[in-house]
Image: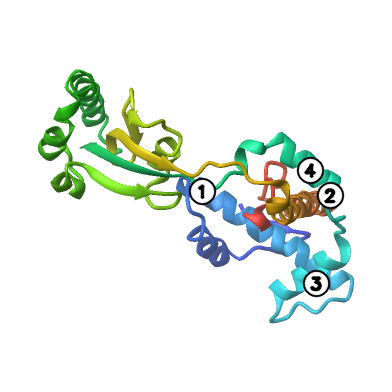
Amino acid sequence: MLAMVNRVVLPEHHINAESGEVESGTIDEKRAEATRRLAVKELLRQRAEAVGIETAERLDAAIDELLAAEVTVPESSDDDCRRYFEANRERFVTPVRVDMAHILLAAAPDDPEARVTAREQADDLIARIQTEPDSFAALARTHSRCPSASADGALGWIGRGQTVPELENVALRLDIGLAKKPVETRYGYHIVRVDDRRGGAPLAYDDVAAMIADYLTESSWRRAVSQYIRVLASEAELRGVDLETADNPLLQ
């Protein structure tokens, strides 16, 4: 089915090219997302031309100009920022780092049998280490499929963004000592031991006020643009594209 916005056809080759920019999903899901993104751009192009903004050879700039003219977002007040700070104090701390070691029991993400086996082995090894703490190094050298095996599993100091998110999201919250459960990642299951941790000290409001203001203003802007696009879509003749379920393809 042709995708159209107010009787303007979205070219198939444009949809195919945009699909390649969609990071995840099935072929059909990527195509649907690509179509939504292009439909939003076409809506905005048409609106820009309707209000006298030149779009030829400058569509992105024209869209920015249009949104600046027609979407108004009030700046966040100090009271807004303070309320957000008080409600989210756990987020405003100095960066956490942990000195950690691990044993990786590797299993491909598309091999369910291997992953079950790796999980069972991880549980067994954790139970052994709990009764024989000094066995961690030898077990890492024997069982780990990470290069750190040659260093008894030691990874050194790890902070945000230094390893896979699945591992760091857990490791950075752990207390010092051996984790009671293995950590699952795309690579398999990790037996994790935290040897030391630093950071996590509360920050004062004045240290983060500007960052909070920027965040709240950005969030408000995204909501306002989403609403603006929904209004345009409700007034448009659409075919072969669903914008009802799109949060905001323009901003993804």
Q: Position of residue 46 (x, y in %)?
A: 80, 67
**SS label for mark 3:** helix
Labels 4 and 3 touching (C-beta < 8 A): no
Per the image, the residue denoted by label 3 is 65
> Disc 2 residue type?
Asp
* CA distance separating discs 1 and 2: 24 Å
Q: Give me the disc on residue 82.
A: 4
Q: How is the image coloured?
A: rainbow
- Image quarter (top left, top right, bottom left or bottom right) of the C terminus: bottom right
Labels 4 and 2 touching (C-beta < 8 A): yes
For label 2, the crowd category at 10 Å Cα-Cα, with few meaning under 14, some 14 to 19 and many 20 or more, is few
Which residue is at a point 51% across and 65% down the rendered structure image? 17
> Disc 4 residue type?
Arg
For label 3, the crowd category at 10 Å Cα-Cα, with few meaning under 14, some 14 to 19 and many 20 or more, is some
Establish if 225 lies above or below 181: below
> Disc 1 residue type?
Pro
Labels 1 and 4 touching (C-beta < 8 A): no
